[in-house]
Image (cartoon, rainbow, N blue to C red):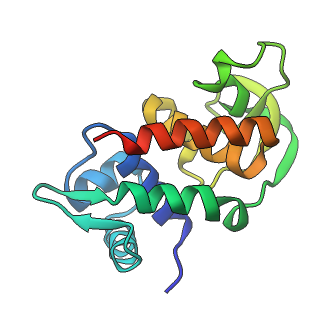
Amino acid sequence: MNLKDQDVLLLVVLTSTSAPPQGYQGLADFTGISLSETHSSIKRLDRSGLVHKGEVGFKAHSQRALEFFLHAIKYLYPPEYGPETRGVATLHHVLPFSEHFPEETPRTVWPDAEGTQRGTALIPIHKYAPSIARNHPQVHQTLALLDALRAGRNRERTLAEKHLSKRLSQP
């Protein structure tokens, strides 16, 4: 059993939002992933020990998710860059990084026709990441932290580890 891109995206959603969407239909509506794929993703995440059925909906095993993000994401999703394009900002221009890096830091974006930023393209971990990020800042921030783990230099990776650890250790 191998995890798929949509599995990782659902894990990000479940670990990022204080009140994650409930049930398969709620997750499907939130992400834009089909209901059948959402069901299959949750089954794979459950088998891998990253998610379990809670009293209401699904819950991520935070410590296991953290371990997965910190140690596997850079190997599963090595950075793929493209030419300058319009898209949704990631890395240095998303909180918490925007607090630590100057505005003139070169932009990195996920290609997206509805994006408002221009910068070097970085292919996201899932094609629906930009549209989810536009509507859900907490998910956007977590995806940017994962991009720092997979594409950042040592300073960005250290900052991402610190922020992910803090986010996922909160009850």
Please, which residue is most extreme toward the top here?
103
Q: Nearer the viewer, residue 37 or 80?
A: 80
Please, which residue is most extreme toward the bottom here?
1
In this rendering, position of residue 75 left or right of residue 30: right
Seen in the picture, residue 104 relative to 126 is either above or below; the reply is above
- What's the residue at 80%, 42% (across, down)? 154
x, y (%) of residue 124?
66, 50
Camera sees residue 23: yes
x, y (%) of residue 86?
75, 31
Instruction: Quarter of the image for the C terminus: give it.
Output: top left
- What's the residue at 75%, 19% (across, down)? 101
Quarter where residue 119 is shown: top right
Camera sees residue 111: no
Seen in the picture, residue 21 relative to 61 is either above or below; the reply is above
x, y (%) of residue 159?
66, 34
Q: Nearer the viewer, residue 122 or 76?
A: 76
- What's the residue at 77%, 12% (across, down)? 103
In this rendering, position of residue 69 left or right of residue 153: left
Q: Nearer the viewer, residue 167 or 54?
A: 167
Please, which residue is most extreme toward the right here?
83
In this rendering, position of residue 123 left or right of residue 31: right
In this rendering, position of residue 25 left or right of residue 123: left
Quarter where residue 55 is shown: bottom left
Q: How many marks?
A: 0
